[in-house]
Image (tube, rainbow, N blue to C red):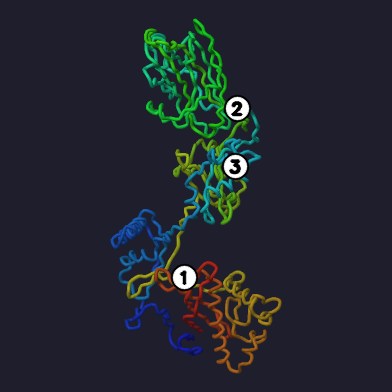
Amino acid sequence: MKKIFYSLISGLAFAVLLGACTDFNDQFEGLDTKTKPTNLAAYTYKLLDADYAAISKSALAVAKNKADSTAAKSIASNKYFTNTVPSSTNLPYLLKTKYPYADLGSTAAITSSFGEDRPAYFSDLTTVNILGEVDYKTAWGGSNYVSSFTPAVSPTTKLPAYLAAKFPTATNGQYKFLEYNYSKTDAVTQSTEVSYFSDDFSTHSVATSSPYVVIGENGWMSKDVRASLNWYCRTYSSNNYAQITSNNSGAINESWMISKEINLQTSIAPKFTFDVTIGYWNASCLSVWISENFDGTPAGITTATWTEISSNFTIPVIPTSGYGTATNAGIADLTAYAGKKVRIAFKYNGDGRPAADLGTDPKRTTTYQIDNIKVSETKVALSVASTEKQYAVYTFNGSSWAAAAISFVALQPADYSAMALSYITSANAPLYLPQLLSQKFPFAQETNVKTVVYKSGSNVTYAGAMQFTFTKGQWVSNTFKIERTEQFIYTKDGWVFDPTIKLPLVRVSGDNPYIIKFIDYVRTKTPDKFFQKGTYVNEEHYYGFSAYYAQIICSADRTTYGDQAIKALTTDAAKYVLFLDRVKEAMPLFTQLNFPNLTTDVSGIQQYVIFTIASYYSSSKAGTLTIKMKCTKSGTGSTPAEYTVESLVETF
């Protein structure tokens, strides 16, 4: 066998080497000084479950930190490798014990499981983002809104703005799973009474005889700041009310009945009203007050700022020897307090001292019965007949949010009902979801992909996602786990991963795809004269590549079709030098076009690509070129990797 070896270091165009084929891989420093193995082994093996456990144990034994330990343990539990827990550094643990006596240069093609990186959006889709009152109010543009989207105020037009405001730092490709209310009909306007506070004392504890129950339920407070007179819950004809009188109190009284805090923050023009009944009137003892800063404590009554609003009401002052009838006292406009929190109070100023102690003071013992207290307003509001929950998946494209592609399927309430489930668990997802997809997409085509997003727990915000591919008539879940075979090589340092790509450029049915990609590129850079017209358009005669025959041609054809540089040479040796120079010129570009994303090394091992391709001079002179390319600069996104020719060997 005869080899032609082209060395870049020597500066010579080529050298002729005679003798048997020898290995040209220079990874094995010092190999030439050792006894050459007579039988290099080429092992092949597929990992078993027990092998992952053994590798995990070995990796754990040399772990240097918690991260190393976690990675080592994951090999046993997952039974696959990943980009972060690579086979390149972990498989040698097994090979060391499985093939301990391998000769230098022996190889092992090992098949193992690899966990591909799951799409990043899976981590985005673990939470249900539920729209709330504030979100609907913003979507409708004011206080007149409904807690729902409608055909007129649609989720399609409003959700992008909601997402932009809620996630201002979103990155390109981020996804969100949304839950919102939807009405199939548009909102209509109607008048609605909105109550902020009301009490008719019907729920208060009451006694029909002394001792009576002091008003103190439903947040009320009763307190005499001068003596000990209380407001009591009384009843008559099955109607409860609050009552007070200084009759027989034996003291001067200033007794307050104060409400709980009333929230008017969402109000526009609230109104305050109550009913009053007078008994045994002898003096005006009742006044009505409001405060924004009362702290709810007895001591705070005298320190709070109280504003009297009695003038808004008409309280009867007609003397009577008995009880009058219940009468509405009127309405106080509390618009000034809209957007605030307040407390209302009824203050009773009476004097029930004995006549001997009154002196010239008049007796003040009028009885007051207060009932049907209400703070409310009538709003002209929007309403919808009914709403239902809907779910959607949206994605950020770098500048705005939009509904995700149709390959994303957000399960709707009807889907859960069809499965008789309220949510999907990791256990039942593989059982239920393929059937559901079959029903929803009866005309699915082979390789169609759907990512199903669903509620995943009883907690309303838990979500999950699974991806399925339609394969041979069924929806099959994507485990993101594949089998791959990688080569390892035995060196003086033991078994190491060999990232070398070995690619025979051979004839296939149709043009060789690697070669035709190169020829198509050359066509855009060199004159038409280097291409045949008509039939053989899949060949170029500057470098000599033929996609149809999968070979590099150094023959008369290259002279016939315009390569004047070769035609001008008079000896075969000179033509051959030019041929090899052209191959040297072509291969870095050839490799770059076909492998633009490789890196200079894999796990510290230099990245090489080794091509083998037929060479043709004439029917009686044909050989094989073996070209070893070295990656000298890693590919980074739009910038392709760079390569140099490490060696070139031609065998005839």
Q: Circle 1 sits in a helix, a strand or a loop, which is it?
A: loop
Residue 599 bears which disc, if any?
1
- Residue 560 pos. (x, y %): 67, 86
User: Is 620 placed left or right of 242 in the picture?
Assistant: right
293 or 148, which lies in front?
293
Asked whether residue 285 is in view, the answer is yes
Q: Nearer the viewer, mark 3 or mark 2?
A: 2
The alpha-carbon separation of the residues under discs 2 and 1 comes to 71 Å
Q: Nearer the viewer, mark 2 or mark 1?
A: 2
Reply above or below: 95 against 240. Answer: below
Residue 378 bears which disc, if any?
2
117 or 540, which lies in front?
117
Q: Identify the residue position indicated by label 3 in the image.
A: 139
Amino acid at the residue labelled 1: Thr
Hey, which residue is sitting farthest bottom in the picture?
570
Q: Circle 2 sits in a helix, a strand or a loop, which is it?
A: strand
The alpha-carbon separation of the residues under discs 1 and 3 comes to 49 Å
Amino acid at the residue labelled 2: Thr
Mark positioned earlier in the residue sequence (1 or 3) = 3
Hey, which residue is sitting farthest left in the picture?
61
Q: Circle 3 sits in a helix, a strand or a loop, which is it?
A: helix
Count of labels shown? 3
- Residue 437 pos. (x, y %): 56, 45
User: Is 274 placed left or right of 71 in the picture?
Assistant: right
